[in-house]
Amino acid sequence: MTGINNWNAYSNEVLRLRQAHNCVGVIFIDMNGLKVINDTEGHLAGNAALCTVAGFLVGLYGADHVYRLGGDEFVVLLQHVTESEFSSQLKRLRDEASHLGNLSIAAGGQWIADAVEIMNAIQEADNAMYRDKAEYYKKKNKQ
């Protein structure tokens, strides 16, 4: 539906990266509020929102680096980037996400020097994304 890499492509890339021993940055992204969109505007609107986020990520990172894991979860895998470059990429994502209009994302990232540790980096990026999501809802509930 979104036209980007799926879970199988992601799994294959993770296996390939583990064997390559390159430095890798992992960014986990999750949409905020997709259930509300589906419940109030319908699933076609939810699907359109998913496609918008997918297109946004492809625009930032290129189609080869973006994966949809399912539902509203996405992963970006960036290899051959320094830790500083990765930090800049993550900051750019957060800055540019403000241009998504009424859509919102939560993001977390982790950089590693050797992709043999990619499973740990994936878990850390996922944990950071959930912390970002919790902050979003904490702020939203105060409004």
Image (spheres, rainbow, N blue to C red):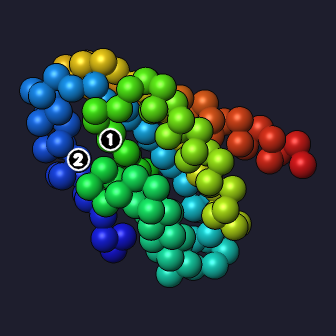
Q: Quadrant of residue 112?
A: top left
Picture residue at 31% right of the left edge, 50% below the top: 65
Q: Looking at the image, is mark 1 or mark 2 nearer the viewer?
A: 1
Picture residue at 48% right of the left edge, 26% below the top: 84
Q: Position of residue 51 (x, y in %)?
A: 45, 71
Q: Position of residue 28 (x, y in %)?
A: 44, 40
Picture residue at 40% right of the left edge, 61% below the top: 58
Q: Quadrant of residue 113?
A: top left
Q: Residues within 10 Å of mark 1 (few under 14, many from 20)?
A: many
Q: Between disc 1 and disc 2, whose residue precedes?
A: 2
Q: What element does badge 1 sit on? A: strand
Residue 94 placement, left or right of 116: right
Q: Position of residue 19 (x, y in %)?
A: 9, 27
**What residue type is disc 2 on?**
Tyr
Residue that badge 1 annotates: 77
Q: Nearer the viewer, residue 78 or 85?
A: 85
Cβ atoms at labels 1 and 2 below 8 Å apart: yes
Q: How far separated are the C-alphas under marks 1 and 2?
A: 9 Å
Residue 109 placement, left or right of 11: right
Q: Nearer the viewer, residue 141 or 61?
A: 61
Picture residue at 44% right of the left edge, 62% below the top: 59
Question: Which residue is farthest right?
Answer: 143
Residue that badge 2 annotates: 10
**Count of numbered labels shown in the rendering:** 2
Q: Residues within 10 Å of mark 2 (few under 14, many from 20)?
A: some
**What residue type is disc 1 on?**
Leu
